[in-house]
Amino acid sequence: MNKEEIYKVITENPVFWLATADGDQPRCRAMFLYKADEHNGIIFHTGENKDVFKQISKNNNVEACFNDFKKGIQIRVSGKLEEIEDSKLKDEINAHPTRQFLKAWRDSVSDTEFYSKFKVYSLKNGKALVWTMETNFAPKTEIQL
């Protein structure tokens, strides 16, 4: 697969699993992609009160795993997360129809609190590994995103 095909699979399968480190203990949880493309990287968000935020703050090396179960494709992307401090992007995410679950929280806090506690991350320049049953035993080839 090339970069364009990888981003297409990622975008079409927005629920992914994010692995972080908590000291020497790995942690993995489902996350919800906001968007992904070659220019912006893989963008998602969380809240400052979450354990995932605390883990990323201590170690921003992560791996994200996306699955297209219908096509039997798994894509793992590893790299370093960058926090995005863009209030316009945070407003855009909050207003997006797929993010209605944020509305109650957003309406209950001040702008200052929202912008400081709503954490947006980008995984840029990651390394992707594509897996299928057909390539299960083939040597792995990293694809620079």
Image (spheres, rainbow, N blue to C red):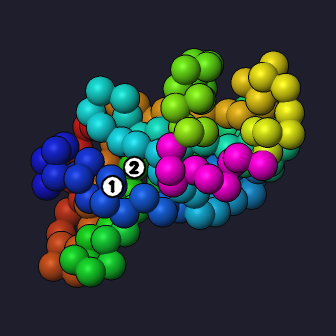
- Residue linked to disc 2: 77
10 Å neighbourhood of mark 1: few (<14), some, or many (≥20)?
many
Give how far across and how far down residue 134 sits, in percent: 15, 79
Three-letter code for the amino acid on which mark 1 is drawn: Ile
| Front position in the image: 135 or 91 | 91
SS of the residue under disc 1:
helix
SS of the residue under disc 2:
strand
Q: Is 116 within the magenta?
A: no
Residue 71 in the figure: left or right of residue 109: left
Give the residue drawn at x 19%, y 43%: 3
Q: Specify the quadrant of the image occupied by residue 36.
A: top left
**Span highlighted in magenta in the image:** 96-104
Q: Specify the quadrant of the image occupied by residue 111.
A: top right
- Whichever of labels 1 and 2 marks the residue nearer the N terminus, that label is 1
Q: Which mark is residue 29?
A: none
Three-letter code for the amino acid on which mark 2 is drawn: Val
Q: Specify the quadrant of the image occupied by residue 75.
A: bottom left
Residue 118 in the figure: left or right of residue 3: right
Give the residue drawn at x 67%, y 55%: 101
Q: Quadrant of the N terminus?
A: bottom left
- How far, Cα to Cα, is label 1 from label 2? 10 Å
- Residue linked to disc 1: 10
Q: Quadrant of the C terminus?
A: top left
Give how far across and how far down residue 37 sits, in percent: 30, 37
Give the residue drawn at x 52%, y 26%: 89
The label nearer to you, 1 versus 2, is: 1
| Front position in the image: 28 or 92 | 92
